[in-house]
Amino acid sequence: MRQVRTACPLDCWDCCSMIAFVENGKVVKVEGDPDHPITRGRLCIKGKQLVDRMYHPERILTPKKKVDGQWIDISWDQAFQEIADKMLKAKARYGPTSVMHTFDSGSGGMLKELEGRFFNLFGGYSKAVGSLCWEAGLEAGRYDMGACLSHDPTDHANSKGIVVWGRNVTVTNMHVTPFLKAARKKGARLAIINPLPTDLSESADLQVYPRPGTDGALALAVCRILLETERYDREFVEKNAVGFEEFAAYLRELSVEELCAASEVAVEDVCSLADFYSDRPVTTLLGLGMQRYANGGNTMRAINAVAAMSGNIGVRGGGVNYANRIWSKWLDWDALTLEGQRKEYREISKVEQAEQILQADPPVEVLFVTRSNPVAQVGNRKRTIEAYQSVDCVVLFDMFLHDTAEVADYFLPCTSVFEEEDILYSSMWHPYLIYVNQCVEPLGNAKRDWEIFAGLADRLGFGGEFRRGLHEWMRTALAPLEETGLTLERLQREHFAPAPSAAVPWHDRRFATQSGKYEFYSQTALEEGHSAFPMYLLPWEHPYHNPDLAEKYPYQLLTIHPRHSLNAQHYILKRPDSPVIEISKEIAREKGLQDGDLVRVFNERGELMGRTRIQEKMHPGTVMVEQGWWNQMGVSVNDLTPDRPADFGISIAVYDCLCNIEKA
Ligand SMILES: Nc1nc2c(c(=O)[nH]1)N[C@H]1C(S)=C(S)[C@@H](COP(=O)(O)OP(=O)(O)OC[C@H]3O[C@@H](n4cnc5c(=O)[nH]c(N)nc54)[C@H](O)[C@@H]3O)O[C@H]1N2
Ligand SMILES: Nc1nc2c(c(=O)[nH]1)N[C@H]1C(S)=C(S)[C@@H](COP(=O)(O)OP(=O)(O)OC[C@H]3O[C@@H](n4cnc5c(=O)[nH]c(N)nc54)[C@H](O)[C@@H]3O)O[C@H]1N2
Ligand SMILES: [Mo]
C-alpha cells in the first residue's frame, strides 16, 4: 500500500495534513498526519469521509445538460462549445459583465484561484464579492488593529484565562481542544460565552448565555466596568492606542444595567467577566457566531476593545484570535488571476446576490457557480431560487447534484482533493501551508476546475494562458516567500511550512492601522460610513428594534454549523431523516413541548419541521437547528433566514432571525 501525503481542503479552521493509503489505484482510507505540528495526526469524521464522498455512488462523473427539466449526459466537447457560445453571445449583446461568477471556499486549494484568471481574460465579468462567512469580523479587526491575526496555538499554554466567545470549538475547530486542555492542566481558567450549550460549557469556570446578537452590549458593559473600576491597562491605552479618551467618554454615557438588560445577562456575570479579563494574560478565541447579525461588526469591535483595554493584546498568552490573515502579503495572487487583464468589471454582493441579480443592468445571462452551494447556503432561499431561475444559463461545477443543481442548466463534474495536486493555504486559524500530492487519477470524466476553465478558454481563444505547468503556477504564486527561504521545492519536500509570522501578533505594538496603533477610535471606520468607535447596536430582528415582529415571532433562531457535516457537504453520506430542534426548557414550558415532539419552526419567510431536544442550560428564548440541510431531503434552514447584510463589509447576517415554534 502506497502512502501519499495530502491535506484536507474543507473550508475550516483546522486545514489538516493527511496521509492517504492508496492500493491498486484506489484510496483505501485516509488518516491524520502525525507529523503536522498543529493537527498532530487527528482527523475529524468530515475529513475521513472525504474518501466516501469521492467514491459515492451518486457522485457525478460526466458533464450534464438539463433538457426539459431532465439531466442528460453530454461530452466535454459539447459542454465547452455550448457554454462558450452562450458566453460570447451574452458578451456581444451586453458586454462581459453579463457573465457572472459566484464561488465560495468549497475547496481551499491555491490553484482554485485560476478561476479568476479565466474571467479576467474573458475581458471581465461580474464577480460575487463579500462573504457568506466572516467578513464583518474581519472588517472589525481591520478597523481596530489593521488586520486579524491569531496567536500560534502553542501560545495558549501561557494563558491564565481562556475565553471561548461564540466559537463551537469541539465541533468546528477540534484541533484547538488539546491546546486548551494543556493550558487548563497548567491552571488556566475557561470562560464560555455562547447562547447555546457547547461540549465544554459544563466544565467551564464561567458560563455566559447571552441573548443572540447582543454580545456587543455585553462587551461594552465589561468595558464600562473595567473603566469604572480603573482596571484597564493605562500604558497600553495611552501609548499603544488612539482614541481611548473618546471611547471612554462614550462608555460613560452607557448604563451597565441597560446593556445587561439588552444582552439578558446578569450584572454579576458581567462583573465576573470583567474580573476574568483582569487576571492577565487572557486569550480570547472568537468564533463567527456573533458577527452574523446586522450589528455583527460593531459587536466584534466591542469584544476586541475588551481585550485591548484589559491589556491582553500583543502579549504572550493573550490575543484576540478571530482569523489568521497572514497569506495575503506572502502570495502573489495576481500572478494567478491576472486582474489587470479585465476590461469591464462589476461586483455583486454574495449576501444579496438574489436581489442584485434580479435587478442587474446589464442582466446576468450566464452564471458560473464553483465551490459553493448558494441555494442551500445563502439566506432567504426562495429569493435565491427566483434569481437563479431568471438567469438564462447557470453552470455549476461540483461533485453532486445538490440544491443548486436544481436551478442549473449545465453540471460540470470536478475532481476531489485526492485527484488533484495543489497547495492549501486555507486554515482560518493556524499558519501552515500544506502541499497536496495527487493520490489517484481523476475518476470517470471528472476534471480539475482549472482544466474545465482551460477547456472553455480554448473555445474562447485564450487557451494558451492555461497551458502552464502546475508547478510554474505554484512557483509564481509563492515567489514573495522566496526571500524567507520558503520555496516550492522545500514545501514539496517537507509537505508543510509555517508562515513567516510572529507567534504573538502585535508583540511590538506596531499595529497595521493608519495610526500604527490600536484604534479604539477609527478614522477609517468613520470614513467608511460607520461609527468611529464600537457602538451599542442591536440586531435587526430584536424586540427593542422590531417589537411587532418579535410579538409574532418571539424566539431567536440559530442555524449553526453541523457537527457531522461541513456545511451542506456531508449530508449526502447520511441523509438524516429530520432535524433536531434544540429548545430551552423555558420554551418547552411556554409551548407545552416534550422531548422528541414533532414541531414546526416558522416565520414570515418560511418554515421547517423537526423533533425537539430540550436543553437544560441555554439562552431561554433561543431555538437551534443545524444548517446544511438539503431541500431535497425535505429541509432548508435558509428558507427562514434573511438576506440582509451585517453592518461591516459585505457579510451574511443569517443568525439575525426571529421565529416561532408550535407542535405539528
Ligand atoms: N463540524 C463542522 N466544522 C466546521 C464547519 C461545519 O459546517 N461543520 N464549518 C466551517 C466553517 S465554514 C466555519 S465559518 C467555521 C465556523 O466555526 P464557528 O464560529 O465555531 O461555528 P458557527 O456555527 O459559525 O457558530 C459558532 C457558535 O456561535 C454561537 N453563536 C451564535 N450566535 C451567537 C451570539 O450572538 N453570541 C455568541 N456569543 N455566540 C453565538 C453558536 O451557538 C455557535 O456555537 O467552522 C468550520 N468548521
Ligand atoms: N443558515 C446558515 N447559513 C449559512 C451559515 C450558517 O451558519 N447558517 N454559514 C455560512 C458559512 S460560514 C459559509 S462558509 C457558507 C458555506 O457555503 P458553501 O461554500 O456554498 O457551502 P458548502 O456546503 O461547503 O458547499 C461547497 C460546495 O463546493 C463543492 N466543492 C468541494 N470541492 C470543490 C472543488 O474542488 N471544486 C468545485 N468546483 N467544487 C467543490 C462541494 O461539493 C460543495 O457542494 O454557508 C453560509 N451559510
Ligand atoms: Mo464559513
Image (cartoon, rainbow, N blue to C red):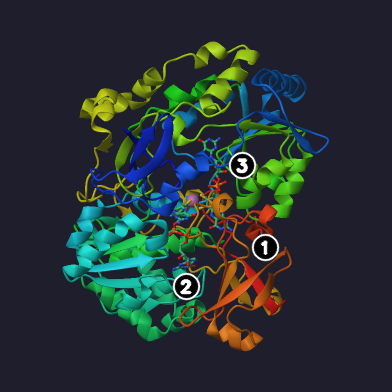
- Mark 2 or mark 3, earlier in chain: 3
Marks 1/2 in contact by CB < 8 Å: the verdict is no
* Label 3 neighbour load within 10 Å: few <14, some 14-19, many 20+: few
Please say if 182 is above or below 551: above
The relative height of residue 169 versus residue 336 in the rendered view (above or below) is below
Q: Amino acid at mark 3?
A: Glu
Q: Are discs 3 and 1 less than 8 Å apart at CB?
A: no
| Residue 196: assigned label | 2
The three-letter code of the residue at mark 2 reads Leu
Image point (69%, 53%), residue name: 632
Q: Which residue is mark 1?
A: 640
Helix, strand or loop for disc 2: loop
Q: Name the image quarter holding residue 201.
A: bottom left
- Asked where in the image residue 330 lies, by quadrant, the reply is top left
Q: Percent x, y for residue 18?
A: 34, 41
Separation of disc 1 and disc 2 at Cα? 19 Å
**The N terminus: image quadrant:** top left
Say if disc 2 is inside 8 Å of ligand 1. Answer: yes
Q: Which disc is residue 58 wearing?
A: 3
